[in-house]
Image (cartoon, helix red, strand yellow):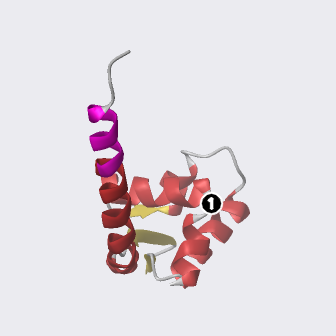
């Protein structure tokens, strides 16, 4: 799971995942059109995502198509769930305290 967190730490990689989630499988060139970076740098980002298991690469002729593989994100979400519950409880407690305070 640390590879997934490391991959998600970069905003360009998060944007790549968003594009794949919203628009489905795409060739490298179509993904590159959304970024102001050279293709070798984009390929490095895609490799990090692939190594983390977040995307799959499929060669089709001379192109490489990438698609989202969401299962590792589910593992992260499952891991984060207890912390989300913790903070929701804390915020509810804070709301209760603030509701009991006088308005002035």
Q: Residue at x 27, y 33 (%)?
A: 99
- Image height check: is 64 above or below 1? above
Instruction: Point out the image quarter for the C terminus.
Output: top left
What secondary structure prevails in the magenta region? helix
Q: Is residue 103 left or right of residue 45?
A: left
Q: Residues within 10 Å of mark 1 (few under 14, many from 20)?
A: few
Report x, y in % for residue 77.
35, 72
Q: The magenta stretch spans which residues?
A: 93-100
Compared across the picture, whether 87 is left or right of 45 comes to left
Residue in front for this viewpoint, 84 or 71: 84
Picture coordinates of residue 71, whole percent (x, y): 33, 80
Residue that label 1 marks: 10
Whether the magenta-drawn stretch holds residue 7 is answered as: no
Residue at image point 39% right, 80% down: 72
- In this view, 39 is above or below 101: below
Among the 4 quarters of the image, the one containing residue 5: bottom right
Q: Is residue 96 left or right of residue 60?
A: left
Residue 83 vertical placement versus 56 (above, below): above
């Amino acid at each position: 799971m640390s590879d997934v967190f490391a991959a998600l730490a970069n905003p360009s990689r998060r944007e790549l995942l968003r594009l794949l989630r919203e628009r489905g499988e795409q060739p490298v060139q179509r993904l590159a059109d959304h970024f102001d970076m050279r293709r070798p740098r984009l390929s490095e980002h895609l490799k990090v995502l692939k190594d983390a298991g977040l995307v799959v690469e499929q060669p089709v002729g001379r192109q490489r198509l990438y698609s989202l593989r969401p299962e590792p994100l589910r593992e992260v979400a499952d891991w984060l769930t207890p912390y989300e519950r913790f903070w929701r409880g804390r915020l509810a407690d804070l709301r209760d305290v603030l509701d009991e305070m006088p308005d002035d």
